[in-house]
Image (cartoon, coloured by chain):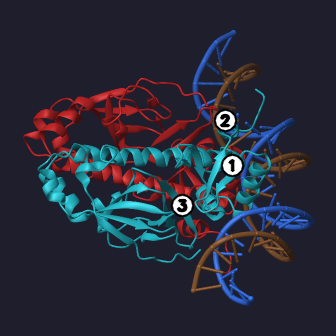
Chain colours: A cyan, B red, C blue, D brown
Amino acid sequence: MRYIHIKSAWQGHSDCRNCTLREMVLFSDLQEQDFLIVHEQIDDMAFPPNAVMFHMGARAEAVYTVRRGAVKLVRYSSNGAQRVVRVLKKGDVVGLEALLGNAYEHTAVTLNEVEVCRIPLPVMQRLDRETQRLERRLMERWQRALSEAHTWLAELTGGMADARTRVARLLLRMRVLGDDGELLVCMPSREDIGSILGITVETASRIISSFQRDGLIQSVDGRNRLYRADIPVLEQIAAGPADGY
Amino acid sequence: MRYIHIKSAWQGHSDCRNCTLREMVLFSDLQEQDFLIVHEQIDDMAFPPNAVMFHMGARAEAVYTVRRGAVKLVRYSSNGAQRVVRVLKKGDVVGLEALLGNAYEHTAVTLNEVEVCRIPLPVMQRLDRETQRLERRLMERWQRALSEAHTWLAELTGGMADARTRVARLLLRMRVLGDDGELLVCMPSREDIGSILGITVETASRIISSFQRDGLIQSVDGRNRLYRADIPVLEQIAAGPADGY
DNA sequence: CGATATGTTGAAAAAAGTCAATGGCAGTGG
DNA sequence: CCACTGCCATTGACTTTTTTCAACATATCG
């Protein structure tokens, strides 16, 4: 419930020119001269699980692109209740709102071990002024974020589907490529599942337990919360209650 | 449940230079020369209530800015269920996704009488190429849309608050300035309330009825679905169940 | 090794959904 | 003009889902 801010480990300057993620991310259109601006200003960083990358309301100083792991964006309402509004994964940009406002709009917390590139705001602003090549990518990011948010709204929130169905949908969205190339599911904590889907931890626990009993999912790595999953059956459950129509 | 496409009324070319909404909307930074591009290409249009402005999946040909009324964005899931993902009001831009994809991502349906400016895609693209002055406004739009979507997620969806609380929040968000200058609430149909909040029409009806019985809201204009509302009490309900904190 | 989070399970209560019947209102066509 | 039809809203009774409260197990970490 309480997050502990853990100092992140600095991993060295990022070599953006040769970044394997480059085509996925913001800088794919940049040219040689543009990288002079970027030079030595972008750091690779690593965060442990449950680390706060930044707080809602804090002055925005950088955006981050996720290289590994997952990050949750949390909003707190006035009454103290918290809700996860989105989960960002490899290739996503964290803190996009920094470019326009001067404060972050949510708290960003790592779900597991996370590696990011930290791009200071001044770099973004200079790139934005001196080259047009960034604009389009930025818009694509925004559009993708918006689209994701809408999908969450339509598929993951209450009312249209029961909790079991939504948990299945969430798990399907949490698929990641395991080290051995197998497609695995990265299981969030029960509390996070609850905060994402708008259900209690107990309900989340009961549903996950039942999936486990039915052999739909099985832990493969307790540390990293990785599970092997029966995707087809999960998809069937995700499609909704089995009305034999 | 079934929407009827009603031919919209063409209202004449829009005089963007002197538009009263201009500072609110996209073109606030444009200069005299930029309007040559725009010249005579932007139409004012009016739609009756429940008109489909465009369908999800349709080829995107224009974006619209709302001058009057409200528009709902609807998503259909595979199983046919529909969900309202956002409601756009005066000053908002409808169909922003058209700029990047080539298809609309939702169906846009008017909630009441709506007036819009229709900006054809080619105009946007030309402006985008020939002037940088549009970029920033566009980003602001995207950011605002994203922020709104997150707020919906956090405040209007199930799990964090009971249905009664969420209905109160929705009503507060539906405030509009009436003709006589009074602040009124534009009441959506029960079906729309349900589709926005993820509750059934029956539940929506029961809650609205109870608000009415308690004198919290009273109809002032049956046609336009306008209600006078006791804002302070609604805000109290919107804050959450009255736990004596 | 205790202390503190995290996850599991059960039983009872509350919230919301479902099913079914009814009323009102607007538009249609005789 | 009036009966008729279709749509929307309302209300009641009953069922289902989910929450709540409480106890207990299991890990994790200093």
Q: Is residue B92 visible?
A: no
Residue A34 got which mark? none
Give the side of residue B63 with respect to residue B40, left or right.
right
Which of the two residues, A9 or B82, is positioned nearer the viewer here? A9
**Residue found at x 51% / y 38%:** B74
Q: Residues within 10 Å of mark 3 (few under 14, many from 20)?
A: many
- Evaluate if marks 2 and 3 touch, with contact meaning CB atoms under 8 Å apart: no
Q: Which residue in the structure is indicated by mark 1?
A: B205
Q: Secondary structure at mark 2?
A: helix
Count neighbours of disc 1 (C-alpha within 10 A) and say few if under 14, some if 14 to 19, many if 20 or more.
some
**Chain bearing mark 1:** B
Instruction: Establish whether labels 2 and 3 are both on one chain.
Output: yes
Residue occupied by mark 2: A232
Judge left or right: residue B162 versus residue A104.
right
Circle 3: residue type: Val
Q: Which residue is mark 3?
A: A84
Q: Secondary structure at mark 1?
A: helix
Q: Position of residue B120 (x, y in %)?
A: 27, 30
Q: Are marks 2 and 1 on the same chain?
A: no
Task: Report, in whole angstroms, how far the alpha carbon at label 3 lies from the one at label 1.
Answer: 29 Å
Q: Residues within 10 Å of mark 2 (few under 14, many from 20)?
A: few
Quarter in which the C terminus of chain A is drawn: top right
Please, what secondary structure does the residue beneath circle 3 have? strand
Identify which amino acid the numbered label 2 is placed on.
Pro
Q: Nearer the viewer, mark 2 or mark 1?
A: 2
Which is closer to the viewer, label 2 or label 3? 2
Q: Gap in Å between the C-alphas at discs 2 and 3?
A: 27 Å
Residue B26 position in % (x across, y down): 25, 46
